[in-house]
Amino acid sequence: MSTDADALRIVEAALGLDDPQARAALIVAECGGDAGLRTRVEELLSREGGDFRLLPTESFIRPLSIVDSIPERIGPYRVTGEIARGGMGAVVKAERDDGVFAQTVAIKLIRGDLASPRAQARFAEERRILARLSHPGIVRILDGGDADGRPWLAMDFVDGVAVTEALDARGADRAARLDAVETVCDAVAYAHRNLVIHADIKPSNVLMTADGRVHLLDFGIARLIVGLDPDESGDPYPLTKGYAAPERGVGVAPTIASDVFSLGVLMLAMLGVAVPGPDTVHVPGTRLPVGQLDGDLAAIAGRALREQPGDRYPDVAALLSDIRRHRAFVPVAARDDAGWRYVASRFVRRHRRGLALTALVGLALVATTVVSTVQYVRAERARAEADARFFEVRKLAHFMLTELSDDLSDAPGTVVARARLAEVSGRYLERLAAVRDAPADLRFDTAQGYRRLASLLGLSGTASLGRPADAARALNAAQDLLDTLHREQPGDAQVNEELGWVASARWTLAKDGRDDRWNEVAAAAFDKSLAAQPERASALLGRLTVEKNRGFARTTSDRPKEAIAVLDAALARLRASALKTALPREAKLLESGLLERLGDARYYADDIPGALAAYRASAAIIDAALARTPSSLWTEKQGGAAFNISSTLADMKGRESEAHAIAAKGIADLRRYLAFGPDAALEMRLLILLGEDSILLQALGRTGEAASTSREGVALRERRLAAAPSDPTRRRDLAVAMANHAAIVAAAGSRAEACAVARRGQNLWTSIRTSGALAERDARIDIPRINQAVDRYCGS
C-alpha cells in the first residue's frame, strides 16, 4: 500500500476520535517508527476545518467523475463534447453561441473540491498573467470565469494529437524531432521569462497539428514564479509519473528546475527512446536510462535529468542553447570536461571542406619539423608532466572547495557530503601549500578553503554539521595563513577581504553573537579592500554584512533604536548599490537578513506592527527564492521567518490561530528537507519552531497536541546529544528545555511523565555542574526552575 493510502486510512480513523490525546495515541500506534508516514498524516489532519473538505469518508485523490458533473453551458459557451478528464478536472470542447461571434474553444474546468476561496483567488491571478502570454508555440488563453464555484479557462481549440504520437506517425527523422524539441523549449523559456512555470510538461500537453506546428497547452495549472501565497496548504499541482522531477515527489513546489527535468524526459520521448520508469537502470546521478542515447544528446539529456535540481541546466535557455550547439557541431556545455579530442572533433565536423586542403599543406610542414623537435619534446616532457600534475591537483582542490561545493549548497541532504568534500580538498591544498616557496595565490586558496570548511562544520545561519569547535580550528588555520600574506602584501584587496570574512565568521562563533570586537576587525579589513578596489562587489557585501551584525549586537545590548538606524542605513546602501546585479543571490540573502534584524530591533523597541512588516518583507524574499528552486539554505531562512512572524503574531491579541498556522507550515517545510539528511542549522530552526508551536497550541487550549509537539522537540534534542555526547552546548540545550516540557505534559494530564522529565532535567544539570561547564545564568535561573518542577510534579 502506498504512503498516501496508509495515511488516508489513518486519517479516516483519527477523524472519528474527538479527544486530542486519543487521536495522538492512535497516530503514534498506527505510524510506528515511520516518520514520513506520520508527517503525511499530520499534514492531512492539519487541513481539518480549512478550505479543503476532510471527512472520514472522503479521499484527497477522487476523480472528477465521482464528485462533479460537467454543465451544459460554461459562460457564453455551449459544451459540445468532452476531450479529457484527469485528477485536476476535465477539458471539454465548446462553441460560443452568444451571438457576438462564432468560436470553437477548449475549456479547462477545475475540480470542485480544489476550488477553495484561496485557490480561486490564485487561479484568477494566474488567469490574468497567462492571458498575457503571446507566443506561437503556446495555446492562447481567451476567457475565464467561475461556473457554480468551479474556475474555468477557455483557450484556443487545437485539432492535434500528442507530439510523440504525431512524430511517430509521420516517421519523422532525428532532425525533424529536434526541430519540435526546440519549439517546445522556446515556448517554455518564453513562459519562464514572463514568470510562469508550466509544472506539468508531458506529451499530452504538447499537441502537433496536421501542418506540423507544435502547441504547448494546459497552463491552467501553471505556477507563478513570484507572488505566491506562502500560507497556502495542499498541493494542487499534478505529478505525472515519469515526467515529474524527483523533488516533486516529496512535496517540493514546481520550479524552473523541475520544468527543465520534465523537458529532458519529453525530449527522450520525442526522440523516440525510452523514458525513465520504475524498473529502468539509470546513469548514476541522473534519471537518464542507460544505453538510450550517446554523445552530445546523452550528455544534454543527462544534464537535464540530474537527480539534484542544482545540477541541472540553470534554465531552459541553457538547455535550448546546448541543443542548438549540438546541431551546429559546436561543443556543448554539458560536455565541458570531455577534453581536447572532443573539441577538435567538433571543429573538424564544422570545417570539413577547408580542413581537407589545409591538411595537405600541413602534412608537408609537419614532416619537415618532426625530426628537429623530437629531442626537445623528450627533454621537456618530464618537467611538464610534473608541473601539470601539480596544477591539476591544485585546480581540482580549488574546484571542489568553491564551484562544486557552491553548486551543492542548495541541495537538501548534502551537508555531510560537502563537509567531506571540503576536508579532502583542504588536505590537498594543505599538502601543496607545504611545498617549499609555495606561491602566495596557493596559500590564499588554502586559507579560503579553511574558511569555507569552517562554515560547513559549524557556523550558525548556514547549512552545517553543528561542530563549532572544529569550525573555530579551521578559522584559526585560515587566520594564520592570511596574517602571513597580509604582512607580505598589506594593501592587497583580495587578502583584506578574506580577512574580513574570517573575522565576520569569528563574530558568528562568539557567544550569543554579541562580541563586537570581531565586527570592528571585519569592518576595518573590508574598508581596506574597498579602498584598494572601490568596485569590489564581494567586499561591499562583506561590509554590509558587518552592519547587519552590528545591528544585531545593538539589539541584544538593549539599544534597539541605535540598531534601527544602523540597519535602515545598510538597507538603503544595499538597495542603491549594484550588488543585486553583480551578486544577485548573495544580495537577496543579505537583504532578507537585514530585514530580519530590523524586525528584531523594532520588536524590542515595542513597535510590534513595524516588526511584523519587516519580518513579512524578509519572508517574501525567501518565498520568491524558494519558488525558483528548492534550497536548504533558503529553507533554513524560511524556518526563521516562520518563527519571527508566528511569535510576533502571538503577542497580538486574538491572532494565536494565525500564528499556529504559520508555525505549523514552517515545521512541515523543515521536516521535509531534513528527511534528505542531517543539517544542524535546519534542526535548530525546527527545535525553535516546535517550542513556539507547543506554546501556541497550549494557549489555544489544545494541550494534547502541545504535549505531542513538545515531545518531538525533546526527542530531537536527545538525538542531537546522542550524536555528539561531549558537546556541552547540546547538553545544556536539552537541560534548559526540560522545565518547559514538564509543564506542558503536566497540563495535558501526564503528571507521571512530567515528573520523569523533571528528574531527567535535574540529572542533566548535575552532569553539567560536575563537568565545570555551569554558567552563572544556569545557576541563577535554570537550575531553580527544574528543581521547582521536580517539587511540583514529583511530590505527593
Image (cartoon, rainbow, N blue to C red):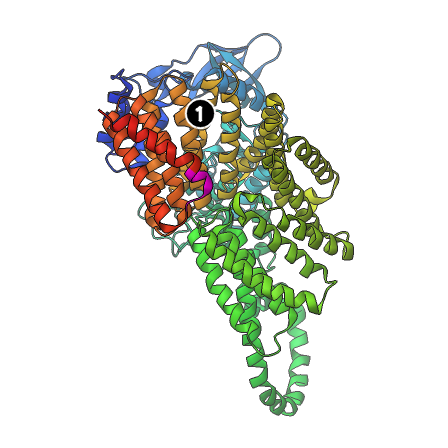
Residue plotted at (49% across, 21% down): 650
Secondary element under disc 1, as helix, strand or loop, is: loop
Q: Is residue 207 visible?
A: no
Left or right of 586 in this view: 685: left
Give the vertical position of 434 relative to 380 (above or below). above
User: Which residue carries the number 1 mark?
Assistant: 233
What main secondary structure does the magenta stretch of the protein show? Answer: helix
In the foreground, 170 or 41: 41
Q: Is residue 197 magenta?
A: no
In depth, the one of 357 and 66 nearer the eye is 66
Q: Position of residue 547 (x, y in %)?
A: 67, 42
Q: Classify residue 341 by image quadrant.
A: bottom right
31 left or right of 649 in image: left
Q: What x and y, as percent, mark residue 521?
A: 66, 53
Residue beneath the point at 61% across and 92% down: 375
For the C terminus, the quadrant is top left
* Magenta residues, start to end: 774-779
Q: Amino acid at mark 1?
A: Ser
